[in-house]
Amino acid sequence: MIPGLINFHQILAGLSHRGTVILSIVFCMALAMIVHELGHLVAARTCKVSASEIGLGLGPKLFGFRLGSIAFSLRAIPVASFLRIDGTALEARSVPQQLFVHLGGIGFNLIAAVLTYGTVFGWINLLLAAGNLLPLYKHDGWKCGVVVMRALLRKKSQPVEWALTFSGCFASLVIISTLIQVFR
């Protein structure tokens, strides 16, 4: 090669490798989110709570299909996943059953992390489980906090739930900030 000229072959090989790594991570993250929602689904069915849809992403539906009584959908904004569950039926269950359903996704992620230990998929499952334990609004840790608070108060209390939401977000920021400082 002539000195000073750009080696396009090396650049393309580097981009190709980076692209493969990025696609692998995106695929593993999507699969881990589906595993998470399947954990909630199994727990809900165990507690006789109906569910109608597992969604990957948020916003308008791009694509979907049905398997038995569950609709699967791919949404336009690829940042989250969800299980559409009968909230009224879930609230009618005992506190341990409600917690079991809310923690079912985390349990499945931890099982997947152990079974695929040392792989990108294993680490993503572990991170997804840990992130969902944080008491951030609408995450599983927050939902468990709401269940416990309602059980302790024996009623719903919007001010208490708001306090839980704000303090949970603050605690999550402190936890994440501390972890970033420790692993820096």
Image (tube, rainbow, N blue to C red):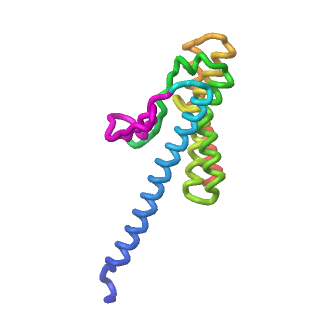
> Farthest residue toward the top?
155
Res. 9 visible in picture: yes
Please identify the quarter of the rendering in which residue 139 is found.
top right
25 and 56: which one is in front? 56
> Farthest residue toward the front?
68
Please identify the quarter of the rendering in which residue 52 is found.
top left
Left or right: 87 with respect to 147?
Answer: left
Whether residue 27 is situated above or below residue 128 in the rendered picture: below
Magenta residues?
A: 51-77
Quadrant of the rendering where the C terminus is positioned: bottom right
> Is residue 69 on the magenta stretch?
yes
Give the residue drawn at x 52%, y 38%: 37
Whether residue 183 is situated above or below residue 77 in the rendered picture: below
Give the residue drawn at x 52%, y 29%: 138
The picture places residue 84, in percent across and down from the top left corner, at 47, 29
The picture places residue 87, in percent across and down from the top left corner, at 52, 21
Give the residue drawn at x 46%, y 47%: 30
Left or right: 161 with respect to 25?
Answer: right
> Is residue 81 on the magenta stretch?
no
Quadrant of the rendering where the N terminus is positioned: bottom left
The picture places residue 132, in percent across and down from the top left corner, at 58, 38
Res. 170 visible in picture: no
Give the residue drawn at x 54%, y 34%: 41
The chief SS type of the magenta part is strand
Please identify the quarter of the rendering in which residue 76 is found.
top left
149 and 162: which one is in front? 149
